[in-house]
Image: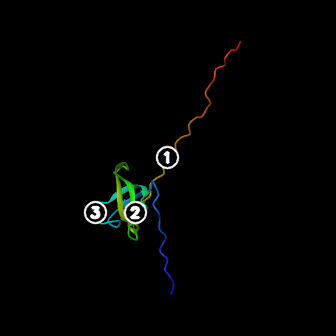
Amino acid sequence: MTARTPPPVRMLRAGEVLSLTRAASPQFVVPMRVRVIRELSDRFPPYGWLWFEGYQLDAKGRAVAKRELFVLREGLEWVVTAPAPARPALSRRPPSRSRLAVG
């Protein structure tokens, strides 16, 4: 008889965007997107469930409410978002100095 090992668990990371549906919890009759702030590891949910803090997002991806959510880890759907556009480097020229006449 061999011992079964549980499947690897993907931990939540700050900034990830999740789509929450009824697969995550019966409370999500209307699907919702959230951006993860942090997983709340100081709480002790039943096996397979987790608590996390996140920002509820509107259709344009803007945060509209901060929420604490209790969800089934197996029901989470990660949303692949485009990386933020790179910002052009700022010019770092030393300031021009005028010469002073001494004497």
Q: Is residue 22 above or below residue 6?
A: above
Q: 10 or 60: which is nearer to us?
A: 10
- Which label is found at residue 29? 3
- Residue topped by disc 2: 43
Q: Position of residue 21 (x, y in %)?
A: 33, 63
Using the image, tell me which numbered label, if any, was put on residue 35: none
Foreground: 70 or 55?
70
Marks 3 and 1, how far apart at CA: 34 Å
Q: Residue 74, how many percent across, how many down? A: 40, 68
What residue is pinned by disc 1?
A: 85
Residue at 48%, 48% in the rendered image: 84
Query: Pointer 1: residues within 10 angstroms few (<14), some, or many (20+)?
Result: few
Q: Looking at the rendering, which quadrant does residue 32 occupy?
A: bottom left
Q: Which tag, 3 or 2, sits closer to the chain's start?
A: 3
Residue reaching furthest to the top:
103
Residue at left 49%, top 80%?
Answer: 4
Disc 3 crowd, CA 10 A, few/some/many (<14, 14-19, 20+): few
Residue 102 or residue 41, whichever sits in front: 41
Inspect the image, locate mark 2, and give the three-letter code of the amino acid beneath it. Arg
Q: Nearer the viewer, mark 3 or mark 2?
A: 2
Separation of residues labelled 3 and 2 (CA atoms)? 25 Å
The kind of residue tagged 3 is Val
Against 48, residue 36 (above or below) is: above
Which one is earlier in the sequence, the residue at label 2 or at label 1?
Answer: 2
Q: Position of residue 99 (x, y in %)?
A: 67, 19
Q: Using the numbered discs, state the Cα–Cα distance from disc 2 to disc 1 in whole angstroms.
A: 36 Å
Quadrant assignment, res 77: bottom left
If you read the primary sequence from the N terminus, does the residue marked by circle 3 or circle 1 appear first? 3
**What is the secondary structure assignment of the residue under circle 3?**
loop
As drawn, which residue projects farthest toward the right?
Answer: 103
